[in-house]
């Protein structure tokens, strides 16, 4: 009989982040599928009472916590010790966790510490012949694999957007403390704080409804034979502000900034989407001035609704990669979009 | 950028420019003889106590990115590898079947001369046309000069990789891809080494913050095997001139796709099909079948096809869709795509084969046989010959002077089959200067008389041949319609050559998203074309006033990757990340270089990047 | 302690970005069709780790860089031609399959073992670098597993900056929302699993290449063999999902009409 433990953690804000709540749903769903109908929660952080007030209706059969000042901020050494201790204490053989940066920093280390095996960024699971199998993406979302493991404990992490975040009516829960004695080496790193990136416009918004992708075409010569990067910059900046969209870019546009070509000043490699960049999961995506070839579209696999603006009716987007392609000039269209959004 | 960056210098014994069959033959032969059985070795003169320091610089990002669908008798290659089993090399097979087809035009859109139409009518009257399945007629026999059996079909990329890994494994030579050579270093008419391209510059060559000047590699001996459009080869041609009566005015663009054949295809590995007649009479085509349901299918568009609108990609698609070819390809998938220039002057294009400190091998040295249409084995053989010459000189402790190289390399070459067969082929293409039928007759004459008979030809520079669009389409499109089409091309996304071809009756090509795809899709999905940032543009326009006045802009139509497009004020613009380095631009340019009438107004040099497809 | 570091970089090859990848069944699990023919590059994030290592080593004389790589020898030889001109390093090779379908839990111990066996490696000078995840398996676990096996309890993931300071180091790791978590630590060893960093790719230096090659060929010959798969991880399926939409191509709309439709869609 599989024993589930779901690791949750405190974040920057009060309460539990969306990713944590989604993972809670995953745990509940999996426990139902497995027929155990029960799972434990393992909580890490400091001054966890505010989190505990949410978990009374979570459906967990038991809540364990490591509540220590060492766990105030994410740190590999202390987080691994805490998660390992929770796993051992719970007796769980299936350990679930959200694929947040705090977890991704340390979960494999914790798994190794307790002699387990791990598969991360799970996109789905099912039970076949009583056996749990999981799905995950390989080769940057190009191939989907289904696999199973015999060894236990088996650690699984879940990427955002796979499950609905659990809706918790506040109701205080009690938790059992798990004591951990942190060694000097586990805690010697000092966390100084959070820093915003150097670029002056905050353009990465993973929780935005819309991903706006600016392709290399913004910096190319336009119909009048001129380059209009300043105008491009102004249009894109205004759109991001008006719409609250997150900004993505193709690799070529980011690369151009290394070549000294005039490109969007607020673009950095953090915005890069696609083969070597990030994999966003916004519900909507609008691609402008990019061609839509398969390798460049790979990073879009999780964007649900896709539209593109391109002067070429035969671009890659038009052939099965987008829902709608508007054949038109992005400079013109985005200018009008901005005016409409500004009007409200 | 206040102080000049110091250019570093490195010493080697032998520097090679370009890695292809010729340099492969050279290094395979050389590397086998640097270490002796008794543990001694040929000592380096620049690093005493160490073995000979042999370095090869290849511009492409990997050895597997070379382009060609190859069918070869492989005499020299098999001599270097007596136990060669094609199964050891991916995409290789023994030639099993050879056929040549004449393709009729099912649509009537091509440009056929009256004599050619008469010949086709005759064929049809003789019943061959009526019985002709798939609008094609098979030649009853393969002329011996074209026969490749016993031979191999090979993928250039996989062959290069196979050869390269053995050379690297020997530990006696180093192969460096992604290392374009800017130029040969010449002092007092002696080649003293090579200079690599500057890195960390913008498109115009201006240093950025990551600037590193290209290193100078000083070497006693430089082997130039950089192909027919190689920058160093052409630099040497321009510096030292060509031998009397030689020219390099004949070219072709070879463009091909590697296709995964549909399950229904019956063709066996080792099948070799050659075609002529479609999509234009001047365009020869081929289909070679590899193992594992792969095939290479392609065309050659020659410089003597005087169409100012010639564009290989569209022609390749029409070729693939010809019923005779399409019966094998329909339902297939594009695996790879590429293009390269071929030097079609053959022996007449041969430069000075050796000079003080250097020697030329391979296609850039005029080794391609333009009668049999083969070049790979010939290139390999010239590399082997040079290696033998070099080993002789090293053994005797003699310097790499022109005289010594002539005695040991050039003399070997002159006595070899490369030379004798090349001489037979010298006149083979002359007839084509005046048209397809004459060309076929001329080729036949040269072939069957072993070169004794053939047409004389007064060759023209390529830019001298190309007529204006109005002239070429006279009788088929009137000037005002042409003017309208030009306006349409300027306003919209469809290029002029496509609008013209649509207008004169070429059927619309419907993309099937698997094999018949847009040119940009072929570039990305097929060719996987990529270019690293930080290098200057390797295609530039010398005198932009000439571009502004040019009404033909053949460079735009002919560019294999659509990397050259119409720019502001009539000056074409170049996007290096679409370039496949085929070199077709510079020999198609219709404007002469104001400083050198043998050259055109486009400067084409080496750069990194380009094709990244290994199955080719 | 002098600032001469021992920087060990773990990284392996992945297919060149634009290659077509088709999964197929293999004897021990899925592989890629024509895997041995696919052009390869060093994993992009591992590459950055390697360049950061080179940069750090250059700034601190006496430092040394090792590249520990697990992959098929023939492909690694090709890979070396592409990276050996970038920076000076010693190579340690483990010969075995390196695809995305291999199990990190099987291979990490082999990497750790190879690192332990590096002659002259001093753990208290050691920085263990790698990519934060790969373009093949994309799991983000290998560096942690290797680090844990080596007893390193100080690890950072998604690193873009590592600064050496007077009394230690400062690290910037990517966290949610495009922000960075800034940490400081004093002593080594440490594991840094890099994201892209901020350094440009080093130019090709033929001198460096020539020197590296002298060590690379012998390292290839000495390669240890990767352990056979444990079989614990078992694939039931590997496939390329078909994603084709019925695209509505709207050709004859005015820019105004397009803009209105887009705004309505955004607000919906």
Image (cartoon, coloured by chain):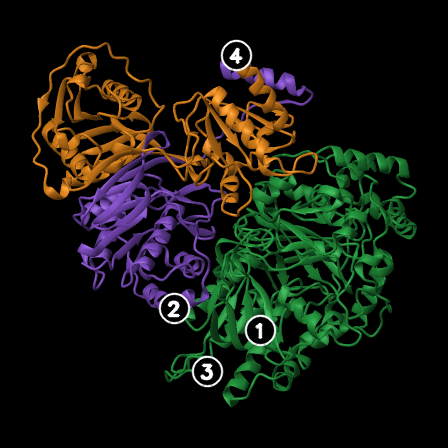
Chain colours: A orange, B green, C purple
Q: Is residue C30 visible?
A: no
The alpha-carbon separation of the residues under discs 1 and 3 comes to 17 Å
Tell me the subunit letter for badge 4.
A
Q: Quadrant of residue B476?
A: top right
Query: Residue at coordinates 30% horizontally, 46% vertically from top-left?
Result: C162
Where is residue B237? Give x, y as percent: 69, 70
Please name the residue shown 19% across and 51% down the image. Answer: C188
Q: Is residue A28 visible?
A: yes
Q: Are marks 1 and 4 in contact (CB under 8 Å)?
A: no
Q: Position of residue B137 (x, y in %)?
A: 78, 50
The reply to whether dot 2 and dot 1 touch (C-beta < 8 Å) is no
Mark drawn on residue A344: 4
Res. B45 mark: 3
Q: Which residue is mark 2?
A: C211
Q: Secondary structure at mark 4?
A: loop
Q: Of discs 3 and 4, which sits in the foreground?
A: 4
Query: Which image quadrant: the N terminus of chain C?
Result: bottom left
Distance from label 3 to label 4 (Cα)?
78 Å
Viewer-side residue, B217 vs C137: B217
Look at mark 1 in the image and give the residue it sits on: B223
Q: Which mark is residue B614?
A: none
The relative height of residue B122 versus residue C250 in the rendered view (above or below) is below
Question: Label 3's element?
Answer: loop
Q: Are marks 2 and 4 on the same chain?
A: no
- Left or right: residue B143 versus residue A238 is right
Element marked by disc 2: helix
């Amino acid at each position: 009989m599989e024993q589930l433990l779901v690791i949750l953690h405190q974040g920057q804000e009060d309460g539990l982040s969306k990713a944590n709540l989604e993972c809670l749903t995953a745990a509940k769903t999996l426990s139902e599928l497995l027929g155990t109908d029960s799972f434990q929660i393992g909580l890490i952080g400091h001054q966890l009472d505010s989190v505990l007030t949410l978990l009374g209706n979570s459906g967990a059969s038991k809540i364990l916590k490591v509540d220590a000042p060492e766990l105030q901020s994410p740190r590999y050494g202390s987080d691994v010790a805490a998660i390992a201790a929770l796993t051992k204490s719970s007796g769980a053989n299936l350990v679930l966790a959200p694929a947040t940066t705090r977890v991704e920093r340390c979960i494999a280390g914790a798994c190794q510490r307790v002699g387990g095996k791990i598969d991360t960024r799970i996109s789905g699971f099912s039970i076949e012949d009583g056996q749990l199998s999981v799905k995950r993406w390989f080769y940057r979302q190009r191939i989907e694999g289904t696999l199973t493991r015999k060894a236990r404990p088996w650690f699984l992490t879940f990427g955002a957007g796979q499950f609905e975040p659990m809706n918790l009516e506040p109701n205080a829960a009690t938790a059992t403390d798990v004591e951990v004695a942190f060694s000097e080496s586990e805690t010697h790193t000092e966390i100084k704080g959070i820093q915003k990136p150097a670029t002056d416009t905050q353009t990465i918004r993973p929780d935005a409804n819309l991903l706006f992708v600016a392709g290399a075409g913004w910096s190319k010569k336009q119909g009048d034979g001129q380059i209009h990067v300043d105008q491009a910059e102004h249009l894109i900046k205004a759109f991001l502000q008006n719409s609250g969209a997150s900004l993505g870019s193709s690799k070529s546009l980011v690369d151009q900034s290394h070549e000294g070509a005039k490109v969007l000043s607020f673009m950095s490699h953090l915005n890069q989407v696609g083969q070597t960049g990030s994999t966003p999961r916004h519900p909507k995506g609008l691609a402008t001035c990019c061609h839509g070839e398969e390798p460049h579209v790979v990073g879009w696999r999780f964007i649900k609704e896709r539209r593109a603006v391109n002067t070429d009716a035969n671009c890659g987007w038009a052939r099965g990669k987008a829902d709608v392609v508007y054949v038109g000039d992005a400079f013109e269209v985005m200018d009008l979009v901005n005016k409409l959004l500004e009007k409200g | 950028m206040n102080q000049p960056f110091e250019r570093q210098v490195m010493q080697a014994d032998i520097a090679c420019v370009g890695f292809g069959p010729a340099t492969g033959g050279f290094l395979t032969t050389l590397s086998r003889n640097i270490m002796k059985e008794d543990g001694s070795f040929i000592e380096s003169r620049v690093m005493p106590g160490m073995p000979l320091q042999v370095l090869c610089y290849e511009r492409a990002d990997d050895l597997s990115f070379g382009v060609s669908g190859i069918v070869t008798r492989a005499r020299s290659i098999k001599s270097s590898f007596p136990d060669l089993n094609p199964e050891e090399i991916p995409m290789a097979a023994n030639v099993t079947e050879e056929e040549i087809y004449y393709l009729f035009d099912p649509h009537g859109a091509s440009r056929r001369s009256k004599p050619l139409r008469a010949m086709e009518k005759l064929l049809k009257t003789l019943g061959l046309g009526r019985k002709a399945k798939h609008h094609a007629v098979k030649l009853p026999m393969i002329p011996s000069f074209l026969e490749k059996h016993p031979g191999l079909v090979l993928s250039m990329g996989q062959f290069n990789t196979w050869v390269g890994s053995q050379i690297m494994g020997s530990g006696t030579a180093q192969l460096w891809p992604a290392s374009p050579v800017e130029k040969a270093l010449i002092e007092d008419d002696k080649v003293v080494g090579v200079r690599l391209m500057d890195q960390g510059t913008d498109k115009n060559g201006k240093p950025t913050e990551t600037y590193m000047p290209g290193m100078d590699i000083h070497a006693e001996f430089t082997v130039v095997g950089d192909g027919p459009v190689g920058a160093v080869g052409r630099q040497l041609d321009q510096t030292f001139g060509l031998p009397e009566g030689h020219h390099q005015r004949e070219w072709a663009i070879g463009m091909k796709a590697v296709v995964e054949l549909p399950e229904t295809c019956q063709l066996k590995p080792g099948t070799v099909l050659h075609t002529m007649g479609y999509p234009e009479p001047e365009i020869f085509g081929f289909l070679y079948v590899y193992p594992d349901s792969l095939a290479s299918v392609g065309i050659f568009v020659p410089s003597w096809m005087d169409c100012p609108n010639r564009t290989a990609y569209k022609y390749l698609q029409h070729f693939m869709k010809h019923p005779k070819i399409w019966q094998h390809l329909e339902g297939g998938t594009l695996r790879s795509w590429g293009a390269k220039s071929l030097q079609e002057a053959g022996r007449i294009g041969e430069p000075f084969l050796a000079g003080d400190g250097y020697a030329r091998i391979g296609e850039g040295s005029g080794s391609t046989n333009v009668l049999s249409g083969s070049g790979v084995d010939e290139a390999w053989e010239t590399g082997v010959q040079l290696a033998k010459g070099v080993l002789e000189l090293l053994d005797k402790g003699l310097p790499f002077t022109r005289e010594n190289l002539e005695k040991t390399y050039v003399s070997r070459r002159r006595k070899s089959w490369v030379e004798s067969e090349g001489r037979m082929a010298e006149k083979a293409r002359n007839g084509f200067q005046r048209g397809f039928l004459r060309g076929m007759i001329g080729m036949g004459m040269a072939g069957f008389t072993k070169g004794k008979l053939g047409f004389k030809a007064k060759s023209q520079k390529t830019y001298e041949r190309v007529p204006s669009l109005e002239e070429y389409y006279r009788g088929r499109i009137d000037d005002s319609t042409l003017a309208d089409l030009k306006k349409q091309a300027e306003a919209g996304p469809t290029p002029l050559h496509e609008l013209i071809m649509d207008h004169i009756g070429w059927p619309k090509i419907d993309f099937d998203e698997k094999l018949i795809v847009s040119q940009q899709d072929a570039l990305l999905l097929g060719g996987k074309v990529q270019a690293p940032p930080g290098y200057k543009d390797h295609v530039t326009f010398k005198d932009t006033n000439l571009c502004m006045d040019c009404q033909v802009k053949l460079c735009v139509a002919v560019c294999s990757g659509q990397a050259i497009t119409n720019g502001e004020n009539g000056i074409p613009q170049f996007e290096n990340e679409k370039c496949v380095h085929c070199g077709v631009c510079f020999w198609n340019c219709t404007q002469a270089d104001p400083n050198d009438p043998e050259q055109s107004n486009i400067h084409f040099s080496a750069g990194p990047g380009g094709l990244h497809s290994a199955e080719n | 302690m002098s600032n001469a570091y021992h920087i060990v970089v773990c990284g392996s090859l992945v297919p060149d970005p634009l290659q077509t990848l088709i999964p197929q069944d293999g004897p021990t699990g899925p592989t890629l069709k024509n895997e041995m023919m696919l052009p390869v590059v060093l994993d992009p994030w591992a590459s950055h780790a390697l360049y950061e290592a080179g940069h750090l080593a250059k700034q601190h004389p006496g430092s040394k860089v090792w590249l520990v790589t697990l992959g098929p020898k023939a492909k690694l030889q090709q890979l070396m031609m592409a990276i050996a001109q970038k920076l000076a390093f010693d190579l340690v090779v483990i010969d075995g399959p390196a695809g995305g379908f291999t199990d990190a839990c099987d291979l990490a111990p082999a990497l750790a073992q190879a690192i332990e066996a590096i002659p002259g490696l001093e753990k208290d000078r050691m920085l263990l670098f790698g990519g934060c995840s790969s373009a093949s398996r994309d799991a983000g676990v290998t560096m942690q597993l290797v680090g844990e096996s080596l007893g390193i309890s100080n690890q950072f993931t998604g690193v873009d900056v590592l600064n050496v300071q007077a009394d230690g180091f400062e690290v910037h790791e990517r966290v949610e929302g495009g922000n960075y978590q800034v940490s400081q630590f004093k002593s080594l060893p440490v594991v840094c699993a890099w994201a892209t960093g901020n350094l440009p790719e080093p130019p090709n230096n033929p001198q460096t290449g020539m020197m590296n090659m002298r060590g690379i060929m012998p390292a290839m010959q000495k390669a240890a063999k990767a352990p056979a798969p444990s079989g614990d991880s078992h694939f039931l399926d590997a496939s390329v999902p078909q994603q084709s939409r019925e695209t509505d191509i709207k050709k004859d709309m005015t820019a105004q009409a397009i803009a209105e439709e887009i705004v309505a869609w955004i607000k919906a």
